[in-house]
Each structure stands twice: as structure tokens, then as C-alpha cells.
Image (cartoon, rainbow, N blue to C red):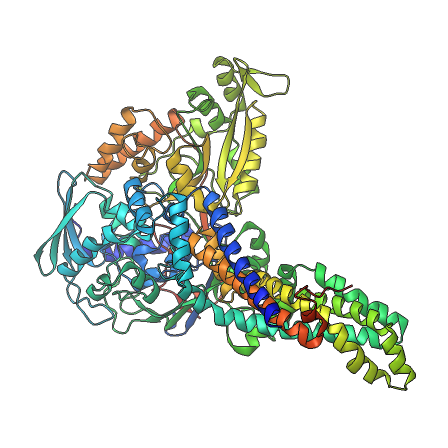
Amino acid sequence: MRATPTPWRSAAVLAAGLAALTACGSGGGASGAGAGTPRTGGTLTFAVGSDTGCADPQQVGSNDTIYSVRQVVDSLTDQDPATGKIVPWLAQSWTISGDARTFTFHLRPGVTFSDGSALTAEVVKANFDAIPKLGPLGILAEGYLSGYQGTDVVDDLTFKVRFKQPNAQFLQATATHSLGIEAAASVRKTPQQRCSEGIAGSGPFTLQKYVPSQSITLAARKGYAWGSSLWKKPGAAYLDRIVFKILPESGVRTGGLQSGQLDAIGSVGRADESALKASGVRLLARANPGVAFGLSPNNARPPLNDEKVRQAIALGIDRRQIAQTVFPSGTRPATSPLAHTTPGYADVGAPLSFDQARAKALLDSGGWTPGTDGIRRKDGKPLAFTVKWFANAATNKPALELVQQQLKAIGVRLDLKEQAIAQIAQVQTSGDFDALWGNVTRADPDILRGSYSSRLANTYKLPASGLDALLDGQAAEPDQGKRFDLVARAQRDIVRHAYTIPVVELQTELGVAKKVHGVLFDASSRIQLHDTWVG
Amino acid sequence: MRRYAALRLAQAAGVLWAAYTVSFLVLDLLPGDPVSAMAGQGADQAGIDPAQIARLKSQYGFDEPVPVQYAHHLGRALRGDLGDSVSAGRPVTSVIGEALPSTLQLVVAGLALAVLLGGGLALAATYTSRRWLRQLLLSLPPLGVSVPAFWAGLMLVEVFSFRARLLPAFGNGGPRGLILPAVTLAIPTGAVVAQVLAKSLLTTLDEPYVQTARAKGAGRPRIHLRHALRNASLPALTVVGVLVGQLMANSVVTETVFSRNGLGRVTAAAVTAQDIPLVQGVVVFGALVFVLVNLAVDLLCPLLDPRIAAAGGRRWSPA
């Protein structure tokens, strides 16, 4: 598993172009293709809906904030959104030990941070050593480094990262914003200081000003010359400045874009699509990689501890109808526990098709007979369960109401219970639920292990089975081909037993003014603005 | 007067304590805690380590028994320390302090506009002798009260910013950016001022002393502004104390619609994140403002009507 930089560059450029084409699920021409000659300079005004109160890439988890702080740091590697391949960025090459426990990276020379200090192996070590101490906001980065034993500095530009257990997902994790490398002086600050003051990175933009819940202003880094091997433009970014405005009201974001006060907006909803398109705005969309949106049953609690019931529910849901009526156009029905943009994704086929007759037959054979009210019963108990859901997306309620109707047709009663967003973690860890509605974004299939291994947190109470070995096996497999074989088998196994019931692939949708070009999605369906220019 | 003032002060302190205690109990009844809430905020929930959450909970003191937490927090609050915001990682007082100036600007501008528009409307409606005009003007306040601030704000943005492009739709940018939010805030508040003042002016204008003044040959403007307004303004002044609370509540919506910085945004974010220390800080701060404004009103009322203090602290109430 050794990557050399030069051949990657041309392949990467091609791939980035392809990604831009596939990324454009619902709009007109790809913004990435770039009509006309790119222009250097200018300001991009980008509106997002929320602010997490933190300007440190290692500590943010919400897309709205990642969009901006991502531009300030570089990562050791980058991930090709079209193929999922890990390619060079700050690291020119790397090797992974046979047991997937030791990762050796060779840094590119001549990289400096915006505070003038140089990127060395020592700085990377300081970053990784500090991450486990970040606190509640650093949970994403801390998870990527779970089992971290230490970093050994071999020479100025070479270091080895060691883990207690096999950790194949770590390579993809080095491509995320969460493990973006910060200057030593920033690492020494407290997590709170890093949040409120921002950090110095080596990225194509620097943080110029952060006003909490108001705006984040970025300025282009002069002399930037160490971009990801995926980017088209060598050297510094096209734009001089990017202003991220935090506008919580979606009507104001849409109106602002239509009236020309904004250049781009995040979180476009289905309701805004037609008005935006009519005013010439381009809509860019890409499915979030990771676990698709769906029902996650508590596999230990009746009635969903009955495999036949779970299988019947999976067959009783008309995913196409839900994707087409509730979600933004271009949303795909789920065809696996993983979204199709996840590396290692495999289409599992039949168990996730819509087949009411088979669903009913399964329930009949399981002893669930229709009652007078149309709801099936067994030993006097109705076939009913409650889904707890969180108001973190406007689509949740209508989607679940549709599922509710669809399941009624096969004799299953679904009750809905809304919970406060702040209680997600509490509900998950307590295990007090029949089923949850949600997704998890991650551009590495190891997310399956985090979600469905009975040996880890086991939020969904899966029984110990051969699945655990498959999931541990992929985590320990340094060869990508072999690893993805294991991942494909795990996906089929999960769906065969209906441990989870995937419904749709959540997609990220952006609205971009006609004059803006080169807004590209990265492998995690977040954005990269180095190649962006305003015509 | 001194006894009256002392009584008012004691009442104010009691209200503050009650606000603190009730908010503490209500927030404690909520399932979950701020640390778990923050942990769940990230996109990846699969990686949450229960041991780490437990460690952080004890760091913030959320694992102690409720009475201990209450005593501990109340003790600190009495010394002016409201604890640290979990989501911002900074003292609650500094989070509130930073958000305050912007909200203060908005609330003061909104209140001034409300008094000006509401008062003007009430005076015009009671002054005119044209029946149809009076009816028309008097029908405006109920309309203003019933229009949701949210909707009014969006309409103003749509018309004056997105279509006419006269004013900015978002941000704290200078006095021009203050106009639309202040108008949004002033509509429901001004409507209440107009309603109360108009009713009280109409009542006052029927009083015998006004008839006496009229009989002595005083002109309409003099009767209206000198004789009637002073007495009629008492109920309106009392209601202003309540309206400050309404303005603060509406600032949550207004600041969200206009993407302004301020206490309203801080409140909304704190509630969503279940940031208990910050929510409590905001509640106590809100109670403090409310109490101070009402105290000021209570102490002002006797100046307008000396009978109030003489009555031993019984609050003047509109008949």
C-alpha cells in the first residue's frame, strides 16, 4: 500500500472532473466543469444555517461549520470522491504494516503553516497526541484515533503512528477535516481557545475573522503551493476571500441567493428547489457516504427481535416513493446499509426491494395473523413498535409518516415519537427504544463496525454472530481489494438478517449562483473551495 | 417612600431567587445532560465512548446529587459566577456580556419605535373627531398584536430587501441593518402601547376635571397633551415593564430571522444544545432585567401619582 505522487496527479484531475459530473444530481451543468476561463481574485459569499460556536476543524462535526474551517487546514491524505481511493496531500507516500496497526507516513518538504512555522513529523505527533484530550467536541477526531498508542518520529519528515488494535480505517481518517494538521502553537492552546480564536493551519485559506453565530471570514494564503493531488489548479486558490454568513432562516438564504446578496447557500430543501432553479441558480447534490438513512431497530426487544418481522418491514417499505415525494430531487432509495458514495459499497438487491406479498407471507409464516383492525397479532399482542426520531432534518417527519402508511398495508403499526436533538446520545446509550431513525456520515466502510459490531458499543443490540468476525476482519485488512470483499459480505449479512432497515440515501444539496464555478464535493460530500472561482 | 422602595427591592430579590430555582428544577427534570447532548452533536455518533462522557460529566459536576448541585450553583451565582457554558467553554457571564450590546441596541430601538408609533397612534386616534378615522386607527393595534413577529420579519425582508433592495436582509451591519429588525420588534409592542394608551386616554377625557378644563376654555391640544396624557400614561408606563419582557422574548425570533448576533440567538442555541448553565444564565439575566425595569417603573409611578406611595406599596392598577 504505497502511493507515489506523480502518476496520481493526472488521474486525480480526471477523477475530480468526473466527481463534479456525478455530484450534480439535480441541477444543470456541473459547477465544477467551469465555463469560460477561470478568474483569479474576488470574494465568495456563502450562507449556511448554523454555527457550532467553534472554529477549530478538529472539533467540529456539523457540515455548516466544516464547509468553512475545512479550507484552513490540509490533511495528510485526500480521498478521491469518485473512487474512494486515498491519495497524497501533505503526505507524499505511506505504508501500512501487515497487521494494520502501524502506519508510516512520509511528509512533503517545504510546507509551512500560516504562522510561519514549518510542517515536520514532530508537529504531526503533537497534533495526534493532543487529540484524545480535546473533550466533548473532539469526539469525531478522538474516535478516528481510538486505540492510539503513540507516534514515533523517525526523521524530520517521517513518522510512524501506532495503534493497540488493527485500525485499517485510520488511513481514510487522515483524509478528513477532523485530522487536519494544525501548527504547533495552535495545538498548545486549550480546546476552548482553539474554538473561539481559531487555529493556524497550512491550508489554502487562513481564518481572518470569526464572529460567533454571525460570520466566518477566510483570506487566501499567499504562497500556498502544496495542494491536494486531486485539485486542478496548482498553487494558491483563485478566490481572495470567502465570507461564510450564518443565516438560520432558510427563506432568507434562498431570497438572498435569488436577489444576488449571496453567491452560494447550503442546506437547500425540496420546497426551495423550483424557485431557485427558476432564478437560474445551480443545484449541486451528492449523497452523504456512510450509513444510509433508515430505521435502526433494537434487535433485542420485541417485536423487532423477531427476524421475520424485521425482514417483512424491510420488504414492506416503498423506498422509491419516499425518496421521490419527501426528499430533494435526485435522492436515491437505499440499496445497502451503506450509501453508494461510500468506498466498499455493494448493492444488496432483493432484500431491500418493495415486495408486499413476500412481506405478508413472511409475517403469516411467523404466526402474525391479521386482526379486525388490520394490525397483525400474535399471542394477543399487536405487531406495533415506536420509532424515536429527532428534528435534525425537515424531511424526517414526512418520511416517517409515509413509512407508517406503507407498513400499515402489511399489518404493522408504527408509532412516532419525536425527541429533542440534544438527546440523541442519551437515547442511544440508554438503549431505551424500539427503533431509531437516522444516518451516520463517514466515507469509510468501517462505520459498519462502529454501528453493528456486537463487540463495540452495540447500540442496536445485535446478537453475537459471524458478522463480528467479518467486521473485525475488514478493520485488520490492509489490502483494499480484500477489505472491500469482506465489507460487501458484511453488508449482505446485515441486510439478510435485517439488523438495520435502510430507506434512503441522505444527500447534501447546495445552491450556487450562475457566476460561481468549481465548487466541488469531497469524498465526505463536503466542499473544497481551492478550485472555486467567481466569473 | 423609603418603606415602599424597600418592599419593592425585597420583592425583586424574591423574584430573582424564584426564577433561578424554578429554572434549575425544570432543567434538571429534562432527560439527558449537556455533555451527552454535545457528544451527540457530531455527525458520527457511533464513536461515543461512555467512559469519556462520564469523565466529562464529573468535570462539569453533572454527576452529583441534585441538592448538592443546586446548593453549589446557587452559592456561586450569589457571588456573580453563573458557571461555564458547556457548548462555548467560557463563563456564562462573558457569553451573555458579549451578546448583550447587540440585543440592547435592538431592544432599545424597538422600544423607542414602539412608544413613538404606539403613542402617536393612540394620540391621533383619540384626538381626531372624525369617527371613521378613529375607528380605522383603533383597529390597527389588534392587527399588530396578532401578526406573528416571525411572519412580519420575513415579509419586511422580502419587500424591502429582496425586492426593493433598499436595506440589508441580514447581519449586524450598522444602523441600516437595525431598521428592519427594530420595526419587526416594534409592531407587536407598539400595538400594545397604542391599545392601552388609547383606552386610558378615552377614559381620562371623560373625567370631570377634563370637562372643567374645557369649560375654563383650554384648547384641545392643551387638554390632550397637558391634562389628559399625564394621567393616562400611568397604565401605559406600567405596561412597559411587561413589554420589556415581551421585547426580549421576541428578540429570539427577530434575531433568528435577521441573522443578528445577540441574546436571542444565544438563548435559542443554548436551548437546542441543552446547555444548562447557559440557559439558566439567560433565564436569571432575563429575570434580572425584568425585575429592574419593573422596579424602575414602580419607583417612577409615585412621581407621576403621589397617591401610590402613600397607599403603602399597593401597585397602582388601571381601572
Q: Relative to B314, is B112 above or below?
A: below
Q: Is residue A458 left or right of residue B273?
A: left
At horizontal 50% and vertical 56% (from top left) the residue drawn is B17
Report the label total. Answer: 0
Q: Position of residue A74 (x, y in %)?
A: 26, 60
Q: Is residue A456 left or right of residue A155?
A: right
At horizontal 47% and vertical 41% (from top left) the residue drawn is A332
Q: Quadrant of the N terminus of chain A?
A: top left
Q: Kindly indicate the quadrant of the structure image that contains residue B122.
A: bottom right
Q: Position of residue B293 (x, y in %)?
A: 58, 68
Q: Is residue B259 left or right of residue A90?
A: right
Q: Is residue A7 visible?
A: no
Q: Position of residue A246 (x, y in %)?
A: 47, 63
Q: Position of residue B15 (x, y in %)?
A: 55, 58
At horizontal 65% and vertical 60% (from top left) the residue drawn is B151
Q: Quadrant of the C terminus of chain A?
A: bottom left
